[in-house]
Image (tube, grey):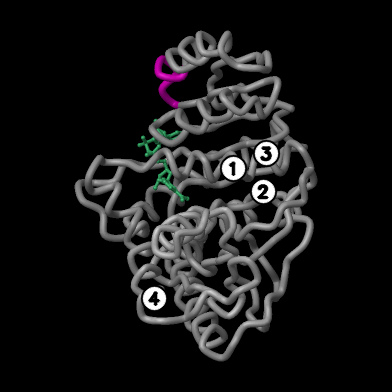
Amino acid sequence: MKITIIGTGQVGSTIAYAVVLQGLCNHLVLAGRNLTKAQGDVLDLQHTLSFCERPMTIESSAIEDVKNSDILVITASAKGQGKMASRMELGVANVEIFKKLIPLLVRNNPQALLVIISNPVDVLTYLATQLAGLPSSRIMGVGTLVDSARFRVLLSIEERIHPDDLRTYILGEHGPNQFPVFSNAFAGSERIADNPAHRRIFHEVTEAGFDVYNLKGYTNFAIATAACEVLKTIAYDDHRTMPLSTYFKEWQGIEDNCFSIPVVVGRAGIIRHLHPNLNQIEKNALGKSAKLIKDNINNLINAENNKSV
Ligand SMILES: NC(=O)c1ccc[n+]([C@@H]2O[C@H](COP(=O)([O-])OP(=O)(O)OC[C@H]3O[C@@H](n4cnc5c(N)ncnc54)[C@H](O)[C@@H]3O)[C@@H](O)[C@H]2O)c1
């Protein structure tokens, strides 16, 4: 299994470190615009291997020389300017980056699954699906997986139950247009109530990424761990369920959109979309989110396409 990470900034390097610690492949490539940084990371990671259980080839590469990967993890991104209030601030620059990167990467890595990390992740997963010309099952964004994980951790503190035993999903946008699915949230088969305390935790989660970013200038540990959950279920063909950003023609009455829905993931990519039975509050939230997310996609991608015609 050959995993290539595109972009060796804070997130790319931390994903690489987590991949090495977890032994998720036998061939890891770090590819970046800044080859010196990639080479430095490679040496540092190679020196980690004697403490790891699995041997692994670790190499650096120029992006144009990346070939025949099984999985491409895309973290390349423009830099945010100062404090960040919205992931859409990266949108115009990252749409441009993706228009150059995705066709090149797909041409040279025709069998690869694409795991999109860069923000705004739902817009970029939609764009990558358009540009790649591959089945949408092969392209996924680590959307609200990280939000759902944060939600479980904060709820676990409130409920004093291990976060892994909390079945709670946040769906929709990796951003302000996300919503919690309390109607299907359980711990030990007991419903996790939709009450003011749990709603307050959900609102904390929506802001949590910015809290970390505005304190230290980037987020890396939670996203790298979430990305590795996706890589692990692909590598071992585990068929685990998780909320990921994916293009769909139709899901629960919403058409032609791209955001996080519950999916089953394995070696072939997204194997199945799951269809939870949402209550009326959640159906309303879904409809509202879907419209706002599609507006973001239209504003960033379609407006740009129309300009270049
Ligand atoms: N989906 C999520 O949950 C999530 C969580 C955290 C961060 N992110 C996103 O991940 C991305 C990376 O974050 P980071 O903190 O590592 O940023 P960073 O600035 O540290 O790294 C970005 C990397 O992209 C490279 N790059 C820039 N322009 C490029 C180009 N034209 N071609 C190729 N490479 C290019 C840079 O050289 C750098 O190595 C951001 O968009 C960030 O918002 C997403």
Q: Is residue 85 left or right of residue 162?
A: left
Question: Alpha-carbon neighbours of circle 1 within 10 Å: few (<14), some, or many (≥20)?
Answer: some
Question: Can you give x and y, in whole percent of width and height, for residue 19 in the image?
Answer: 58, 29
**Whether residue 264 is visible:** yes
Q: Earlier in the sequence, mark 2 or mark 1?
A: 1
Q: Secondary structure at mark 3?
A: helix
Q: Which mark is residue 232?
A: 3
Q: Secondary structure at mark 2?
A: helix
Q: Give the residue at mark 1.
A: 102
Q: Earlier in the sequence, mark 3 or mark 1?
A: 1
Which one is closest to the eye, mark 4 or mark 3?
4
Question: Alpha-carbon neighbours of circle 4 within 10 Å: few (<14), some, or many (≥20)?
Answer: some
Check disc 1 and give the amino acid type.
Ile
**Whether residue 124 is visible:** no
Q: Is residue 34 left or right of residue 171?
A: left
Q: Magenta residues, as a range?
A: 33-38
Label 3 within 8 A of ligand 1 by Cβ: no
Q: Give the residue at mark 4.
A: 199
2 and 1 marks in contact (CB < 8 Å)? yes
Which one is closest to the eye, mark 4 or mark 1?
4
Q: Which mark is residue 195?
A: none
Residue at the location (46% across, 51% down)?
95
Q: Which mark is residue 132?
A: 2
Give me the C-alpha separation between circle 3 and circle 2: 23 Å
Res 104 quadrant in image: top right
Question: Can you give x and y, in whole percent of width and height, for residue 115 in the image?
Answer: 61, 45
Residue at the location (56% across, 43% down)?
227
Position above or below: 233 against 200: above
